[in-house]
Amino acid sequence: MQPGHHRLQELFEQLGLPSAPEAIDAFITRHRPTSLGCALPDAPVWTPAQASFLREAIAADADWALPAEWLGQALCQPLPEG
């Protein structure tokens, strides 16, 4: 039986991306400039299959929704000033 919520590392694995913490940080740093201001599934970094998975997971409020929400905030939202 799977737990009710997945971790961010598991989301990266599901997306077929390297999932080590350093790899996740590097992915966010590399792709943040082109992803700011758009919804996570609409960020230009995804393949069509990855975007579809993210869109469905968020819409269904699936087990993947929490790590997807966190990733969306880290990748697509402006950093607070200060």
Image (cartoon, rainbow, N blue to C red):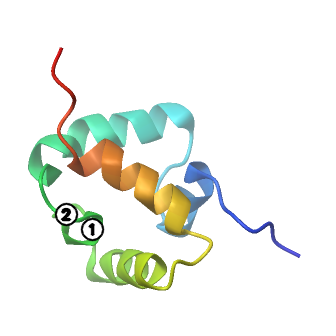
Percent from the top left, x then y, of residue 64?
56, 69
| Helix, strand or loop at mark 1 | loop
- CB under 8 Å between discs 1 and 2: yes
Placement of 75 over or under 63, stated as above or below: above
Instruction: Categorize mark 1 by other alpha carbons within 10 Å: few (<14), some (14-19), many (20+).
Output: some
**Type of the residue with mark 2:** Ala
Q: Quadrant of residue 20?
A: top right
Where does the N terminus fall, quadrant-wise?
bottom right
Percent from the top left, x then y, of residue 17?
46, 57
Placement of 33 over or under 3, stated as above or below: above
**Type of the residue with mark 1:** Trp
| Helix, strand or loop at mark 2 | loop
The front one of 3 and 46 is 3
Q: Which residue lies at the image location 52% right of the left edge and 56% below the top edge?
A: 67
Percent from the top left, x then y, of residue 16?
48, 65
Q: Which residue lies at the image location 22% right of the left edge and 46% below the top edge?
A: 77
Q: Is residue 23 left or right of residue 79?
A: right
Where does the C terminus fall, quadrant-wise?
top left
Placement of 79 over or under 2, stated as above or below: above
Residue 70 badge: none
Residue 46 badge: 1
Q: Is residue 11 left or right of residue 81?
A: right
Q: Quadrant of residue 69?
A: bottom left
Q: Is residue 31 left or right of residue 53?
A: left
What residue is pinned by disc 2?
A: 43
Q: Quadrant of residue 74?
A: top left
